[in-house]
Image (cartoon, grey):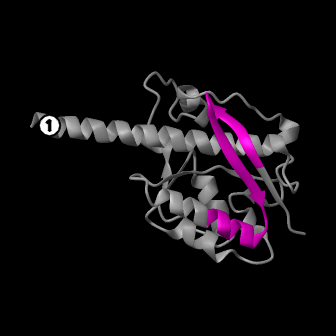
Amino acid sequence: MGFTREFMEVQAHGNTKLHAIHTNDLHKAATTIEQYERHLQFERHKIVGVDLSVGKDHPVLLFQLSAADKNCTKFDNFLADPRYTFVGFSIDGDIEMLGCVALEIAHFVDIQKEWRVPTATKPLDSLGDISGILVHDIELTNAERNRWACMPLSMRHLEYAAKDAYDAYEIWSRLTIIQEGLRRAKLDKE
């Protein structure tokens, strides 16, 4: 049974609102990905925030489409396109789960391995530690975490996933701009 749910104003941070789409309709997914590709073509840094969440029995969210009866070629090609940088936190499990459904992301950056909170006291920072840069004010209860496999997802689950993906995107985007600025300043000094 196909479904599409759109939420136009998921509050991300400050005045930033997200447009979250949850679907297992292949045509809707392909159309949405084409819209994102058109937007990304004008961006210097083509960064895509990722939030993979795993249900008790099967994967959901980013690769919910892969659990559908048919594959969405547009989605598969989007993930495999090396022009885009997909970012996330602690992505080893995500890579493994994507592999279970024969998907691979060509350029997948694990922010957890690439950057550290300067005042950190543990070996690896979580998204929660790093997103202190932003406001991420939603937490799921243990009972809610166990319901990731229920389709369609609740608004609360979609909001959580959208904010996690936004945080990953925003953090890596800021770090990329800062690194670029530092390189430029260094070149100007030479």
**Magenta stretch in the rendered image:** 7-33
Report the residue at 65% width, 38% height from top: 17
* Residue 168: quadrant of the picture: top right
- Above or below residue 168? Residue 91 is below
Q: Determine which residue is flagged by label 1.
A: 188
Quarter of the image with the N terminus in it: bottom right
**Residue type (three-letter) at the residue carrying disc 1:** Asp
| Left or right for 139, reference 171 | right
Residue drawn 47% across the image and 28% down it: 117
Q: Position of residue 43 (x, y in %)?
A: 43, 53
Task: Say whether residue 58 is left or right of residue 118.
Answer: right
In the rendered view, tell whether residue 56 sits above or below residue 80. above
Which quadrant of the figure has residue 23?
bottom right
Q: Is residue 36 left or right of residue 159?
A: left
Q: Position of residue 39 (x, y in %)?
A: 52, 57
Above or below: residue 47 compared with residue 190:
below
In the picture, residue 5 is in which quadrant? bottom right
User: Which of the two residues, 174 or 142, is positioned nearer the viewer here?
Assistant: 174
